Amino acid sequence: MTAIRRRVLGVVVLVVLLAVLLVAFGGQFYGSSAYQNTANIDADYEAHVGEQVHLWGDIVAANEQRGVVFSTETLELTLTNVSPTAVDAGVRVQVYGELRPDRQMTVTRVVAARSGSRRWLYGVSVVGVGVATVAFLRQWRFDTDELAFVPREENDEISEGGVS
């Protein structure tokens, strides 16, 4: 078997393996979502009382009069075990806890997701990928005959239009 056929076979095996892993990961939640459907909870709330849930939503109110009020697109809950001073209204959060009667949720954990943190995360990731790519291409080049990356020799140069 030639080197090119081995490489093509290796890529095919890796793609098939990736597909199997994706299906297996997706299948583990079959019948029960990792994040519950809030529309279903809202439609028949009493049937879900006592369930452990983890939901994404926004803090609508965080004050002494109303307590901490959490809202998704379809569901609004009053959170217990959370101090109104611990969170701010308008913050996107993920809450973990147990649904209680009267549209209350006994919270075991609240995780705030500030909007700027995602932009920062993606920005740093893009810059990191760029730096890693440039560093890699300064030391290696793609050989079209072998369909492989090979170390650059001293007389190889990076041209303005790409690698040579």
Image (spheres, rainbow, N blue to C red):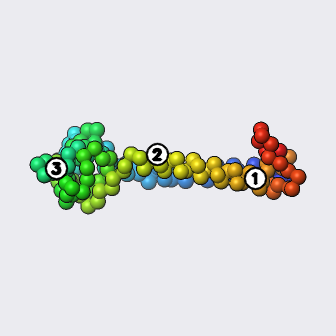
Residue 66 seen: yes
Is 33 displayed left or right of 67 in the figure? right
Tell me the crowding category of disc 3: few under 14, some 14 to 19, or many 20 or more residues within 10 angstroms, Cα based.
some
Tell me the crowding category of disc 1: few under 14, some 14 to 19, or many 20 or more residues within 10 angstroms, Cα based.
some
For the residue labelled by badge 2, is the local secondary structure a helix, a strand or a loop? helix
Is 15 displayed left or right of 76 in the figure? right
Closest to the observer: 162 or 94?
Answer: 162
- The residue singled out by tag 1 in the image is 138
Closest to the observer: 31 or 108?
Answer: 108
Residue 160 image position (x, y, % from top left): 77, 40
Residue 111 image position (x, y, % from top left): 33, 55
Kind of residue at badge 1: Arg
The N terminus lies in which quarter of the figure?
bottom right
Tell me the crowding category of disc 2: few under 14, some 14 to 19, or many 20 or more residues within 10 angstroms, Cα based.
few
In the rendered structure, find residue 119 and report the number of the disc placed on it.
2
Kind of residue at badge 2: Arg
* Residue occupying image coordinates x 44% and y 48%: 118
